[in-house]
Structure formats: structure tokens, C-alpha cells
């Protein structure tokens, strides 16, 4: 089955397509993709993962066509961003 792996940082984004065996998990997909070698600071014990924007467990099985995503921590308060932008316009 074909699965995509997505991870993004401020200046670098990765979108990988790969072939996995049926019954593979989210963790299998991430480990086999090589993204952990490219980004050694990814910590799957702390960072959340998901499929198509919905948070899921590392043990969840993936299906053909799924997009597995590794999420980073939010670095700013999203409630303050609109106020900051509004303040610049005024």
C-alpha cells in the first residue's frame, strides 16, 4: 500500500511517498520513511502524530493512501497572533 509522510519546519518541509506492507502502523511508516534520520531531533515520545490532520496513536494501522503527519509544538500563542497583526495595521 502507498502512504505519505509529512513533516514541516519553518525552513524545510518533507513530503515522502512510500510503499508499506498491509498491517503497518503509524510508527512503522515513520521509522521506515527515514524522516527520523533527516530530523534527529524529532521525539516521537513527546510529539503528536496524526493521519490527515486527526491526531492518532503511533500504534494505529495505516491504510492505503493515508498521509501520516508529525506535528511540532506551537511556538506562539495563536490567540495573540491576530491581535499582533491588527496592531500593525492600525
Image: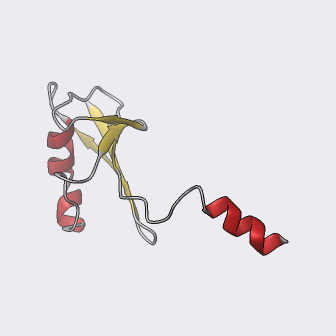
Which of the pair 79/47 is nearer the observer? 79
The residue sitting at 30% across, 37% down in the picture is: 3
Quadrant for residue 84, please give it.
bottom right
Q: Is residue 30 left or right of residue 54?
A: left
Location of the C terminus (image quadrant): bottom right
Question: Is 48 located above or below residue 42 in the figure?
Answer: above
Q: Position of residue 21 (x, y in %)?
A: 15, 31
Residue at image point 29% right, 44% down: 49
The picture places residue 54, in percent across and down from the top left corner, at 39, 34
Count all numbered tags in the image, as a single digit: 0
Coloured how? Answer: secondary structure
Q: Residue furthest right?
A: 90
Position of 19 relative to 64 (above/below)? below
Q: Give the residue drawn at x 17%, y 64%.
A: 37
| Front position in the image: 17 or 70 | 70
Residue drawn at the location 16% of the way across and 25% of the way down: 22
Q: Quadrant of the N terminus?
A: top left
Q: Position of residue 75 (x, y in %)?
A: 44, 65
Amino acid at each position: 500500500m502507498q502512504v505519505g509522510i509529512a513533516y514541516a519546519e519553518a525552513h524545510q518541509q518533507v513530503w515522502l511517498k512510500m510503499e508499506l506492507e498491509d498491517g503497518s502502523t503509524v510508527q512503522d511508516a515513520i521509522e521506515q520513511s527515514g524522516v527520523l534520520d533527516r530530523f534527529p531531533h524529532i521525539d516521537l515520545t513527546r510529539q503528536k502524530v496524526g493521519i490527515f490532520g486527526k491526531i492518532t496513536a503511533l500504534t494505529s494501522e495505516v491504510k492505503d493512501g493515508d498521509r501520516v503527519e508529525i506535528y511540532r509544538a506551537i511556538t506562539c500563542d495563536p490567540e495573540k497572533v491576530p491581535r499582533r497583526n491588527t496592531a500593525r495595521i492600525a
